[in-house]
């Protein structure tokens, strides 16, 4: 599986992989086991980082399914929202750079040439 644009640009660290997964899939909640699996981070590594994510209120528990606690990004936290903006800004920047898209070309009136380059443009 190929690394995301964000991970290529900012580093393929466990914390960045967790952030990337949670941001891209922010509409759903996941168990820690699923977050570890889908973000390709070892469960023990996730447990070590999860304490920080919970203390800083980055994630919030949404419900309990059986024995599994389900979590998602805490979109009420302004730091989380700033990081989401940063994440998509990095993605936009790399996509524009790799496709030779100039910033001002997207600020003109809508045309067939102006195409959304990421989800944040839709």
Image: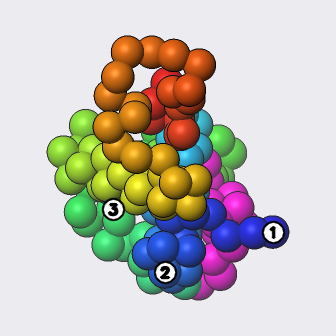
Closer to the N terminus: mark 3 or mark 1?
1
Residue at image point 37% right, 15% down: 109
- Range drawn in magenta: 30-44
Mark 3 or mark 1: which is in front?
Answer: 1
Which percent across, then down, holds residue 82? 24, 49
In this orientation, which residue lies closer to the viewer: 66 or 107? 107
Q: CA distance from mark 3 to mark 1?
A: 29 Å
Question: Sequence-wise, which precedes: disc 1 or disc 2?
Answer: 1
Q: Which mark is residue 31?
A: none
Q: Which residue is mark 1?
A: 1
The main secondary structure of the magenta stretch is: helix
Q: CA distance from mark 1 to mark 2?
A: 16 Å
What residue sits right under mark 3 in the picture? Answer: 54
Question: x, y (%) of residue 6?
Answer: 51, 64
- Say whether disc 2 or disc 3 marks the residue closer to the N-terminus: 2
Instruction: Look at the image and say whether residue 55 sits in the magenta stretch.
Output: no
Report which quarter residue 87 is drawn in.
bottom left
């Amino acid at each position: 599986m190929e690394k995301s644009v964000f991970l290529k640009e900012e580093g393929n660290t466990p914390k960045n992989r967790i952030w990337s997964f949670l941001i891209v899939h922010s509409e759903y909640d996941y168990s820690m086991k699923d977050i570890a699996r889908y973000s390709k981070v070892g469960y023990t590594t996730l447990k070590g980082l999860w304490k920080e994510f919970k203390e800083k209120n980055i994630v919030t528990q949404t419900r309990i399914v059986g024995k599994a606690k389900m979590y998602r990004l805490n979109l009420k936290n302004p730091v989380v929202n700033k990081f989401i903006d940063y994440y998509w800004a990095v993605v936009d920047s790399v996509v524009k750079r790799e496709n030779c898209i100039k910033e001002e070309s997207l600020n003109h009136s809508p045309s067939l040439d102006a195409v959304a380059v990421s989800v944040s443009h839709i």
